[in-house]
Amino acid sequence: MDPILLMVLTVAANALVTGIIVFIFQKRMESSIIRKNFEHQVKFSKFYNKSLEVIETLRQKMILFRTVVIESNIELSSILFMWEDR
C-alpha cells in the first residue's frame, strides 16, 4: 500500500474516532448540565416559596407590633430607646 495513502487513511480514521469520542462526551456533559439546571430550578422554587412565607410572617408581626404601639399610645422612639439599652 502506498505510504501517503496509508497516512491519509490513518489521519481520517483518527479524526473519525476523535469526533465520535468528542460527540459522546459532549452529549454526556449536556445531559449532566440539563440535569443540574433542573435540580437548581427545583431547589430555587422551594426556597422561593419558603422565603415568601418568611416575609409574610415578618409583615404580619410588623403590623401587629405597629397596632400594639398605636393602641397603647407609646411613641416608637421610646421603644427604640429601650431596645438600645439592652
Image (cartoon, rainbow, N blue to C red):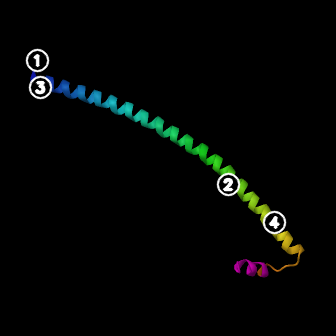
Residue identified by numbered label 3? 4
Q: Is residue 1 left or right of residue 40?
A: left
Residue identified by numbered label 4? 63
Position of residue 33 measured from the top left corner of the image (x, y, whole percent): 48, 40
Q: Are marks 4 and 2 in contact (CB under 8 Å)?
A: no
Residue identified by numbered label 1? 1
Please identify the quadrant where the N terminus is shown: top left
| Mark sitting earlier along the chain (4/1) | 1
How far apart are the two marked residues, 4 and 1, measured between alpha carbons? 90 Å
Position of residue 54 measured from the top left corner of the image (x, y, whole percent): 71, 56
Q: Amino acid at mark 4?
A: Ile
Q: For numbered disc 4, what is the local secondary structure?
A: helix
Q: For numbered disc 1, what is the local secondary structure?
A: loop
Q: Is residue 11 left or right of residue 59?
A: left
- Near-viewer residue (72 or 59): 72
Tell me the residue at 10%/23% (across/down): 3
- Near-viewer residue (38 or 18): 38
Quick one: which residue is furthest to the front in this view? 86
Q: Can you say whether 40 is above or below 80 in the image?
A: above
Q: Are marks 2 and 1 in contact (CB under 8 Å)?
A: no
Disc 3 residue crowd, few under 14, some 14–19, many 20+, Cα 10 Å: few
Q: Is residue 38 magenta?
A: no
| Mark sitting earlier along the chain (2/1) | 1
Q: Amino acid at mark 1?
A: Met
Disc 2 residue crowd, few under 14, some 14–19, many 20+, Cα 10 Å: few
Residue identified by numbered label 2? 51
Quarter holding residue 5: top left
- Near-viewer residue (6 or 65): 65
Q: Nearer the viewer, mark 4 or mark 3?
A: 4
Q: Amino acid at mark 3?
A: Ile
Quick one: which residue is furthest to the right in this view? 71
Which residues are drawn in magenta? 78-86
